[in-house]
Amino acid sequence: MTRTGLFTLSGVLAIVGVVCLLLGMSLMGGDIRDHVASNYARYAGDTDGTDYTCDGTPSAVADALAAEVPPEARMTDRGSTYLRYDDEIVIVGPDGTRPCTIRVEDLGARYNSGGFIFLGPGFYPGAPSGGSGGSPGGPGGSK
């Protein structure tokens, strides 16, 4: 093979490599916030999160969301399903007269202040090492 042929081959292989990399990145699983925004109609929002309408039962919608972008933790409480992701909390349930809604909140909203502590393991806010929970944390080893 000639020198020009080898350069052409290396260029083609580089382009194929970039295309494969981009394809792989697109198949890795997406961002739940983008998925919800592109598939559901927004009806409200505030500084803590955004609300979307959905059709069907909240549990079926939560199942569909979890199948599309798997959550790190999941819990159901009082008719709402809570999905915790790396950067978001997604709440699927009724809201007033709406039988099915999706609320997407940043973890920094209510989560870090203990707003979801009632959901149990996987929803506790991060605790500093050596804090409460059976280990000493204050003067003299107690709080």
Image: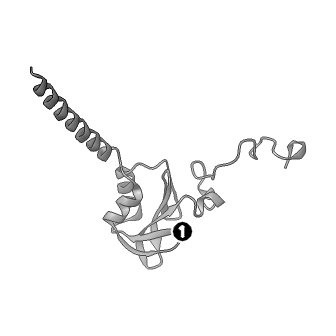
x and y percent of residue 40 in the render? Answer: 34, 67
Residue to which mark 1 is pinned: 48
The residue lying at 81 percent from left, 42 percent from top is 136
> Relative to residue 68, is residue 108 drawn left or right?
right
Quarter occupied by the N terminus: top left
Q: How crowded is mark 1: few (under 14 residues within 10 Å), some or many (20 or more)?
A: few
x and y percent of residue 61 in the render? Answer: 37, 61
Considering the numbered disc 1 on the image, is that residue within a helix, a strand or a loop?
loop
Query: How many numbered markers are drawn?
Result: 1
> Relative to residue 135, is residue 49 drawn left or right?
left
**Colour theme:** one colour
x and y percent of residue 112 in the render? Answer: 62, 57
The residue lying at 84 percent from left, 50 percent from top is 143
As drawn, the residue found furthest toward the top would be 1
Q: In this view, does 43 lie above or below 125?
A: below
The residue lying at 75 percent from left, 46 percent from top is 131
As drawn, the residue found furthest toward the right would be 140
**Amino acid type of the residue that numbered disc 1 sits on in the rendered structure:** Asp
The residue lying at 49 percent from left, 50 percent from top is 86
Q: In this view, does 33 lie above or below 3?
A: below
Q: Which of 61 and 47 is in front in this view?
A: 47
